[in-house]
Image (tube, rainbow, N blue to C red):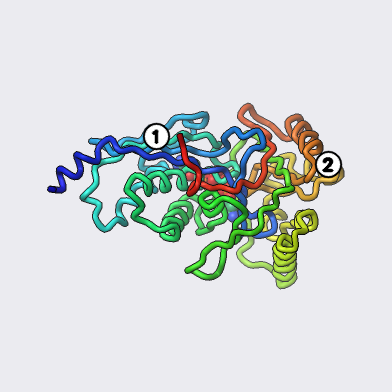
């Protein structure tokens, strides 16, 4: 069959993917640790992408946060991901154009891995549409590349959990790039987005280029102890070991109300309170659902500064985009 006929036959084929929000760093593993999130009320917290082979390329933005997406499709990370995906194929000429719909449900610059959500959902949907030309590992590398374009640096702590689900630690070995840590399933993550944006790029620029030896030692100790406690099944101790010595000292002042809320929540027995990703979302951990609801009410009244702000009670999602089927 000719290439033209193959292309015509493909028109109308569809695929979709949903990528969950994620919290990067989890305070204790700057750029190395991230968790996929699922709301306890089971409502979506992430982006969905629908793709279809079509006569002409097209990107449609829909959803609650469509208005914050760049109007030019070539500036939209979902479309940038598609361009990279197609350019790296060995046989791009054999495929028709693509119509893509991005259902943008996460605010941009939120600290909930919004850019990663769009990238992961689009690349996962495209891999399904094109019949899996890329392995998980190749896809992860593409995701990292697009995410780095948005944030200024290569970091996998949002794309990896959003794609694989769970609590993912980045491995130094390229052939096994992620380690799926035991899911701290007793934890409730209360995540509060105040309604204003803090671009990741900006929040990275305030960080020092180098750290003192004592900071490097503290960071290694907290992260190593955290991981060890998780493997020992000591989830409460692991949560109490969460401390950010790398980014929070420099970012806390960029986020109105963060320090006051953190102090209050710790006094109310939160196991840990930190900045989700680069902020401004705050997360608080507890194993007690009643307390999680109390923290939610407090944050709704004291941390939310704008209309589009929200507070959700979440858990670490077992599944990521790779295994979540849409529709
Ligand atoms: N589909 C998209 N989703 C999120 N951000 C996007 C998208 N397309 C382009 N962008 C741009 O990428 C940047 C992402 O900002 P960033 O602070 O990294 O977001 P987040 O922390 O929420 O992931 C913003 O400048 C935003 O305008
Ligand atoms: N490790 C990154 C995480 C950024 O997460 P985001 O959700 O704010 O994009 C960092 O801390 O810069």
Residue lying at 55% horizontally and 43% vertically, measured from the top left: 20
Q: Farthest residue in the bottom direction?
A: 213
Residue 105 spot, x, y in % from top left: 52, 34
Q: How many marks?
A: 2
Residue 90 spot, x, y in % from top left: 26, 58
Question: In the rendered view, would you say 235 is above or below 105?
Answer: below
Closer to us: mark 1 or mark 2? 1
Residue lying at 51% horizontally and 32% vertically, measured from the top left: 65
Q: Quadrant of the C terminus?
A: top left
Name the residue beneath numbered marker 2: 264
Among numbered discs 1 and 2, the one appearing first in the sequence: 1
Query: Horizontally, is 265 left or right of 182 in the view?
Result: right
Residue lying at 70% horizontally and 52% vertically, measured from the top left: 184
Residue 49 spot, x, y in % from top left: 43, 38
Q: Is the CB–ligand 1 distance for label 1 below 8 Å?
A: no
Badge 2 marks a residue whose secondary structure is helix
Residue lying at 67% horizontally and 51% vertically, measured from the top left: 251
Q: Residues within 10 Å of mark 2 (few under 14, many from 20)?
A: some
Q: Which mark is residue 101?
A: 1
Query: Horizontally, is 262 left or right of 93 in the view?
Result: right
């Amino acid at each position: 069959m000719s290439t033209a006929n193959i292309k015509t036959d493909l028109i109308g084929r569809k695929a979709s993917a949903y990528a969950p929000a994620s919290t990067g760093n989890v305070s204790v593993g700057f750029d190395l640790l991230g968790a996929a999130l699922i709301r306890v009320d089971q409502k979506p917290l992430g982006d969905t992408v629908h793709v279809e082979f079509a006569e002409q390329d097209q990107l449609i933005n829909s959803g609650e946060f469509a208005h914050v997406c760049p109007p030019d499709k070539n500036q939209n990370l979902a479309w940038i991901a598609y361009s990279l995906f197609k350019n790296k194929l060995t046989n791009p000429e054999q495929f028709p154009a693509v119509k893509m719909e991005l259902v943008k449900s996460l605010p941009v610059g939120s600290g909930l891995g919004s850019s990663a959500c769009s990238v992961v959902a689009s690349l996962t949907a495209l891999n399904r549409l094109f019949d899996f030309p890329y392995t998980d590992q190749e896809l992860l590398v593409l995701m990292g590349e697009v995410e780095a374009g948005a944030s200024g640096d290569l970091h996998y702590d949002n794309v990896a959990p959003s794609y694989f689900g769970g609590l993912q630690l980045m491995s130094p070995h390229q052939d096994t790039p992620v380690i799926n840590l035991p899911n701290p399933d007793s934890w409730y993550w209360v995540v509060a987005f105040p309604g204003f944006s803090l671009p990741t790029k900006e929040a990275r620029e305030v960080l020092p280029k180098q750290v003192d030896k004592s900071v490097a030692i503290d960071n290694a100790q907290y992260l190593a102890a955290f991981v060890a406690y998780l493997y020992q099944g000591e989830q409460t101790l692991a949560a109490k070991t969460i401390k950010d010595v790398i980014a929070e000292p420099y970012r806390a002042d960029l986020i109105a109300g963060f320090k006051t809320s953190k102090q209050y929540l710790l006094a109310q027995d939160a196991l840990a309170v930190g900045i989700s990703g680069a902020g401004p979302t705050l997360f608080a951990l507890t194993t007690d659902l009643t307390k999680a609801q109390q923290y939610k009410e407090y944050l709704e009244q004291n941390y939310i500064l704008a209309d589009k702000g929200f507070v959700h009670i979440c858990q670490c999602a077992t599944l990521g985009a790779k295994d979540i089927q849409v529709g």
